[in-house]
Amino acid sequence: MLGADTINFGSDTPGAVPKGWSVNMTHPGGAPKWEVVADKTAPSKKPYVVGQTSQSPDDNRFPLLIYDNSNLKDGEVSVAFKPISGKIDQGAGVVWRYKDPDTYYITRANALEDNVVLYKVEKSQRIPLPPVGEPSNTYGIAHRVPTGVWSTLRVTFKGSLFTVYLNGDKIFDVDDKTFTEAGKVGLWTKSDSAIYFDNFAFVEAASPEGYHLSQTVPVGGAGVVGVLSTMDAAARRLYLSHITQVEVVDLDSGKVVGKIDKTPGVRAVAVVSELGRGFTTNGQGATSTIFDLKTLETIGEVKVGPSPTQIVYDPVTKRVFTLNRRGYSMTAIDAQEGTVSGTIELDARPEFAVSDAKGHVLVSLWEKEVVLPIDARKLTPAGEPWKAGTYERPTSMAIDHKNARLFVGCENRMMAVLDANSGHLITKVPTSQGRAATVAFDQQARLVFSSNGDGTNGEGAVTVIHQESADKYSVLETVKIGAGARAVALDEKTHNILVPFADQGTQMGSGGNDIRYLPDTFRVLVFGK
């Protein structure tokens, strides 16, 4: 399971230690002073941050601020920090697996030295640890750390492997087995460092028995959770819809390898491997951008209906279909020619679609609570809508082509299994609360994933369902994927779940669409076994 917290200090008392935190120190020296202070530039947009403001010149004095309600073995911790002053040092750090002031791990960024170092503190001794592959390097990696500017320091830790990031850039890995048990997380400074901190966040990894957090891939930029992501299994690439562009992540290297820009309000991507092309839906421009899968260069742009959201490719007709949410329509695009083949008018808002690979596109109509089969050649309905009578607000779908089974995610804590040829209800499977943002099917593993969530600070969850036979299904586990997370993608090669995720900047009620996310925290959480 996964627990997530983002902590700000806007409601704490100025001049006092924030509630829920404990002050400690490694080595003697002048008393530390952790206090809530005003800062108009706080990344959280709150009026206050927390700072360590005493400036004792003792070189081996390490003030600590430990978050009481924490106990992590594996996961990640991050914080925004701003070096204010310090003649001896300007070091800002995060602490994990903290047992006491003499036992913990810490990574810090130093604005005077422009470097990042990871240490273990063992028996009160601070020992620098070498990056992986550089056994003779005992003092970290050089990297610009500006004074008076907010930066973000983050570390992921799983077993003995630690990965350090600064402002979204991976700095280095460290492998160390000294401290293996769970411990608290917190903040750290050194000597006369006056440092401000904000947006302290930590995420706990799942237990290893089922799906658990196994990797974090930084993306950066303004964070948006809930957008659709698309996996290109052949090229091992993940396409992330990201406000005005599409980020492209190489999953094998865990790095962003490119982007497709000039896609205003981009919502989704369709990959057409046989033609070497990809297609986007640009919600603000009512267009679809056509791009080259290898170079990511734009080939052309097609005008579609108002507010296109989801998009699907039908291999029989070689057409791409956009679902135009406000237009109550679908636009068919000739994938080879890049031209519009026609428009399908609907009497309800289209929510999601899949191809049955037999010349039909199956579309869920949210308000009507039906699935409508569309003839992909004639661009007309192929019969009456399918109404199972048990599902509410059908949203995302996936299909088992081999057994002709359609999996329909719904809002009433249920996934319906339909016959993909007739629409007949086979069975229903319980899922989690909230809208079914994604349903995915792993043919090889015979697993169905239903990703549900409330969309704001509600906890997102993926229900993992075993396909025992074409008509029999059982729930294996429910995996929490973080507050605000909903949409996921499936890596069929590794069987991993890929979750777009960002830290929240506000506390809002569940169910709204006005959630804000903190800049430079956008990333992909990889859940595996």
Image (spheres, rainbow, N blue to C red):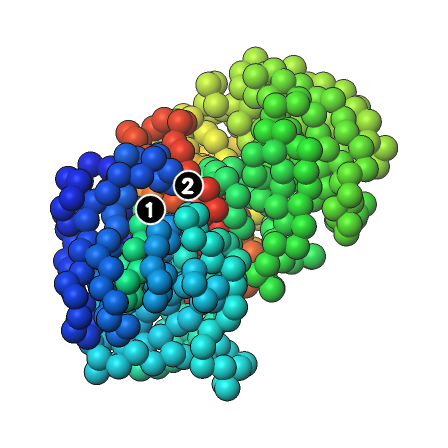
User: Above or below — where is 161 with respect to 339?
Assistant: below
Which residue is more in the foreground, 404 or 149? 149
- The secondary element bearing badge 1 is classed as strand
Residue matched to label 2 = 518
User: Above or below — where is 71 with respect to 379?
Assistant: below
Which residue is more in the foreground, 74 or 96? 96
Visible in this render: residue 181?
no
Residue at 82 percent of width and 27 percent of height:
339
Q: Are marks 2 and 1 in contact (CB under 8 Å)?
A: yes
| Residue 520, horizontal then vertical, whole percent | 48, 46
Residue matched to label 1 = 199
Residue at 73 percent of width and 26 percent of height:
332
User: Above or below — where is 170 with respect to 242?
Assistant: below
Labels 2 and 1: the sequence-earlier one: 1
Which residue is more in the foreground, 522 or 474? 522
User: The N terminus appears in which quarter of the rendering?
Assistant: bottom left
Task: Give the left or right position of residue 5, taking residue 257 as reference.
Answer: left
Which residue is more in the foreground, 373 or 226? 226
User: Above or below — where is 36 with respect to 98?
Assistant: above
| Residue 404, horizontal then vertical, whole percent | 58, 43
Distance from Cα at disc 2 to Cα at disc 1: 8 Å
Task: Give the left or right position of residue 174, taking residue 317 as reference.
Answer: left
